[in-house]
Image: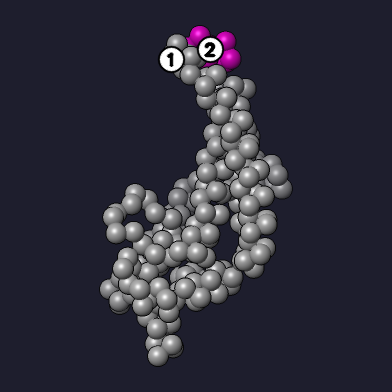
Amino acid sequence: MNDKIRKIIFQIESLKQELESVLNEQDLLYRVEGTRIEFEEKFKQTHQLLREGLFQWFKSSKPRNVLSAPIIYSMIVPMVVFDLAITLYQHTCFRLYQIPRVNRGDYLVFDRHHLAYLNLMQKINCVYCSYGNGLLSYAREVSARTEQYWCPIKHARKIVDPHERYLYFTAFGDAEAFQSGKLAFREALRKGDIPIVDIDDVSDRNE
């Protein structure tokens, strides 16, 4: 990994942290107390006034939305099976690999039901979406750690939205970097290090 690539990756990580900090500052409309999220009284009143009643919500629903509902909610079955499979996989294989397991609770977050401007159906929909998207993020991290353990090699073709570990993988076709760095990738994974590993440093140590 040359200095220019290393510098760009560092800038990307710094900007991501800065963006997250700024966004969090803008979202300080509430406070978290244990498992509850509390809004100021003025916000509570506004939220309740803006809540759309169930009858009006159903009345204004588009026919296409109603028709798609059974298809959307039928996906709960494969999602739950997938959830169980991913969890079983990492709790067996990751223990064998001696690498940290992904904390499922960091990815499956359910808090939108605290919002008073949502009616019952909207809250149910939000819980469902939180589960589906959280599950995919959770599975992606499990898969990313698996890829780092077994095949930390970039593709020859560009891929859309790669996981954050992918940036540090060895270049496609760089056999020397892969052979010299594959054990270092595993060791870094066990330690939870990010940046994952610097192949140039590994190569220097092996010479």
> Which residue sits at x=44%, y=65%?
152
Q: Is residue 198 left or right of residue 1?
A: right
Residue 74 percent across, percent down from the top left: 57, 24
In this picture, which residue range is highlighted in magenta? 53-60
Q: Is residue 55 magenta?
A: yes
For the C terminus, the quadrant is: bottom left
Residue 179 in the figure: left or right of residue 103? left
In the picture shown, does residue 118 fall above or below 33? above
Q: Main secondary structure of the magenta part?
A: helix
Residue holding disc 2:
58
Element type at marker 2?
helix
Locate residue 189, reporting x and y percent.
Answer: 55, 69
Residue 191 x/y as whole percent:
58, 72
Q: Give SS at disc 1.
A: helix
Residue 109 sits in which quadrant?
top right
Name the kind of residue labelled 2 in the image. Answer: Phe
Q: Which residue lies at the image location 47% right of the left edge and 73% below the top edge?
A: 182
**Looking at the image, which is closer to me, 142 or 21?**
142
- Give the residue pinned by disc 1: 64
